[in-house]
Image (cartoon, coloured by chain):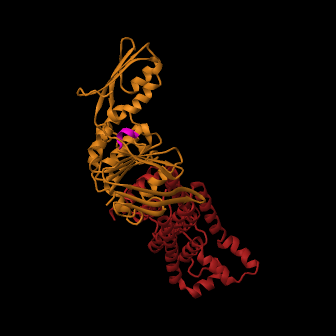
Chain colours: A orange, B red
Amino acid sequence: MPMIELSRVTKKFRRQEVLKGIDLTLEEGDRVALVGSNGAGKTTLIRCLLGEYRCGGHVRVDGREPRAHRTEVLRRVGFVPQISPPLKMPVGQLVHFAAGVCDSSPDRMFEVAERLGLDARKIRRQPFNKLSGGMKQKLLIAVALGRECKLLVLDEPAANLDPEARHRFFQLLAERKEKAAMIISSHRLDEVASLVNRVVEMDQGRVVLDDQVADDVSMTAMLRSRIELARPSDAFARAAREWGFEESEEGRVWEGRVAGPDRLRFLGVVSRYAALLKGIELREQGGVHAE
Amino acid sequence: MKHLLLTAKADISESLRSRWFLIYTLVFGGVVVALFISGLTESRVMGFTGLSRLLVTYLQITMAILPLFVLITTVRSVAGDREAGIFEYMLSLPVSLSSWFWGKLAGRFLVVFLPVILALFGAVVWGKLKGVEIPWAQVTLYTAFLISLAWCFLGIGMFISTVARSSDVATGAAFIVWLFLLLFLDLILLGVLIREGLPPETVIAIALANPLQVFRTGSMLLFDPQLVLLGPAAYVILDNFGEKGYLAWSILYPLALGTLFAWLGFRLFRKGDLP
């Protein structure tokens, strides 16, 4: 039985047709990048999958219709929204509420948060909406991954995470790789390309591309990187420090580590300073030559 | 049931942290304190003395404030949560829609009812300490009236929240509903309707359908069993209901109306798009 089955799915808001007959099937083990520009219909499609929107056509998640079998379907789905909800409830209460309705344990969610570098127990009394963007994101990921689920729906999940937290997040996803199907939504393919084995592109409410991608990149791999510049640059230094790189030779040489699935994103950042580059090296740790 | 209790608990904590709850509690607590300070229990007007006079005044003030508070805060928080994207996340968790809706309603009911009833019982305790005689039958019935009124407007508030897609529209609608019911109180529009030649039975039927008027007449009936204050309308009410019958109507009708609106709201909530 497919994990997700969408057949001729349509959705209209008043006169505007946002989804125009989507056909899509996802099997267990599929990791799909759902890409497309703003207004392509990605969020609407996700909301139909979660049973939050009524829609035309046929939607099945693990054989069940999400609206009619809401709790059974959502018990199988971990969801991380693109925009964190402005919840005023304290962190501890949110975790306890989520664990309570998901039949999980708060400890499990706290542990996932800790792996992402967030000591959620320490901030359990703080209102969720007072946390920084990165902390909110880590907590929502912890709630989604701190329980058993067969489908992960992640809407721009790593957008607010620092490089180290991104690496740990990729490790957590790698642990779920065999057990759960994933939909990772983004408006930029380079953000998520290395995490997936399939790309679905949407445009104006239609699927315009559905293709397999090579998934040779290990989600847990780390690359050692050394960058040599023709001359020191303040702008480059700021970007490199954000990735946790350290300088030597008066800012002309920078060294650090990049998470395997982040390599495309990292190269995208470096490409902005191409004119300054004298040398660049990316090596997979453990001695395998990567680039 | 577990999900319903979790949702109710979350809503109670959310309300207790909010500013509106603080103001709401201060208003009702303040009303009782102001009534004591003004020496109302010691004064004698129209035959009322002691705590019964204070309770009558408190109930009349409550009738004006409680529905507006309940309506505005309920519609703002529910429609506001939807607008802010809280529903999108919270309803992606495996909580059933009935547990979510009725849990929110139950939590909110406790929050809106508790300050009102605590102020009432605060008055009773204060009266007891001052050696004033406590009219227990009145206190019990007033409590039932307050439960009924709070539930009624909570149900209407939840219905408006479901229908209105933005918190501004919901707030406007809630205010209009309150104003409309207030206009149909006996002193204002009903007099005009009679003057314009509308049959008295129709006017009384309108009054009997207005939960604010029902609450008002019910509370009047407790200290004025012949409803002398109400004028000729009292004959229709007492002939058709009797004293006990009308007291039962005053409690059961707003409860039923609130439940009907809440149920309609739930049907719409379940049928439509959630976020």
Q: Find residue A190 and report its image quarter.
A: top left
The answer to whether residue B120 is visible is: no
* Residue span colored magenta: A192-196
- Predominant SS along the magenta part: helix
Q: Position of residue A246 (x, y in %)?
A: 35, 20
Q: Nearer the viewer, residue A279 or B191?
A: A279
Give the residue displayed 39% in from the left and 32% down from the top: A264
Magenta-span inclusion, residue B11: no
Q: Position of residue A116 (x, y in %)?
A: 32, 38
Q: Position of residue A232 (x, y in %)?
A: 43, 14
Residue most extreme to the left? A286
**Image quarter of the N terminus of chain B:** bottom left
Magenta-span inclusion, residue A194: yes
Is A24 left or right of B67, judged from the image as shown? Answer: left
Is B184 left or right of A259, judged from the image as shown? Answer: right
Q: Find residue A111 and report its image quarter.
A: top left
The answer to whether residue A26 is visible is: yes
Q: Nearer the viewer, residue A248 or A61?
A: A61
